[in-house]
Amino acid sequence: MDSALAVLAYLATAVFVLGLIWRVAIFLRAPVRLPIVVTPAPQTRAGVVWRLAREVLVFASLFESNKWTWVLGWVFHASLALVLLRHLRYFLEPVPAWVLWLQPLGRYAGFAMLFALLGLWARRLLVARVRFISTPSDHLMLLLLGFIAFSGLMMSFVVHTDIIAVKRFVLGLVAFDGQALPGGPLVAHLLAVLVLMAIFPLSKLLHVPGVFLSPSRTLVDNGRRPVATKN
């Protein structure tokens, strides 16, 4: 079982990295023949940087569109970031002080992550116009993310696992040195994470690089700026 999980971890990581590179390459090759900025748009590069920062950090356009969706989306992404940063303790030795400081925040952020996912799922089920455009894959993604959050909380608060053995296993993967992995909910949790990594580049979840590569967000609105002519 340990060897099989190690092989799956390597395969999922390879698919994740190569798939991400492939999708970004597709984005970069897409032609932009005309400025298609979403107005009101910045007219300087500094303004574009500020606009992207607002989109990435506070989801500015979503806030202006729908406040409830903004709350659920922002809480989910913020709590997910804390959870991911908390998991760095399994990959780093020694563990930096700032990662140790984040441990309590990351632990309880799992609850916020799960509640936000439930809210986003309820939105897809209860809001008619959102339900109409939702596909089975949308529900499966939310189900997978919810299971990952739920199983992680179970291991943190109910069925505790041997985190020392987990770290030994993870560091062994990094060093290509196979180590034993504790059983129980951890196996299901890890398998769900590997499935998510493998399908991430091919799913709608791949909107992270799209924010930085979308012409409607990254272009300067200078289409009406007068062009100097030679006399």
Image (cartoon, rainbow, N blue to C red):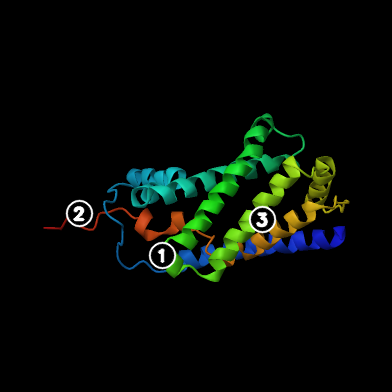
Q: Depth-wise, is mark 2 or mark 1 nearer the camera? A: 1
> Is there CB contact under 8 Å for labels 3 and 1?
no
Q: Distance between the residues labelled 2 and 3?
A: 51 Å
Q: In this view, does 181 lie to the left or right of 94?
A: right
Q: Give x and y (percent) for residue 127.
A: 42, 61
Tag 1 or tag 2, which sits nearer the N-term?
1
Q: What residue is pinned by disc 3?
A: 147
For the residue marked with disc 3, what is the amino acid? Answer: Phe
Name the foreground residue: 140 vs 216: 140
For the residue marked with disc 1, what is the amino acid? Answer: Ala
Q: What residue is pinned by disc 2?
A: 225
Within 10 Å of disc 2 (Cα), the crowding (few <14, some 14-19, many 20+) is: few
Q: Distance between the residues labelled 3 and 1?
A: 25 Å
Q: Give x and y (percent) for residue 11.
A: 73, 64
Q: Give x and y (percent) for residue 81.
A: 58, 44
Within 10 Å of disc 1 (Cα), the crowding (few <14, some 14-19, many 20+) is: few
Name the foreground residue: 16 vs 18: 16
User: 104 above or below 114?
Assistant: above
**Residue 23: image tag:** none
Image-quadrant location for residue 17: bottom right
Any part of residue 22 in sight: no
Q: Residue at x 60, y 65 (%)?
A: 140
Any part of residue 231 in sight: yes
For the residue marked with disc 2, what is the amino acid? Answer: Arg
Q: How far apart are marks 2 and 1 (CA)?
A: 43 Å
**Residue 128: image tag:** 1
Q: Residue at x 57, y 67 (%)?
A: 202
Query: What secondary structure is marked by label 3?
Result: helix
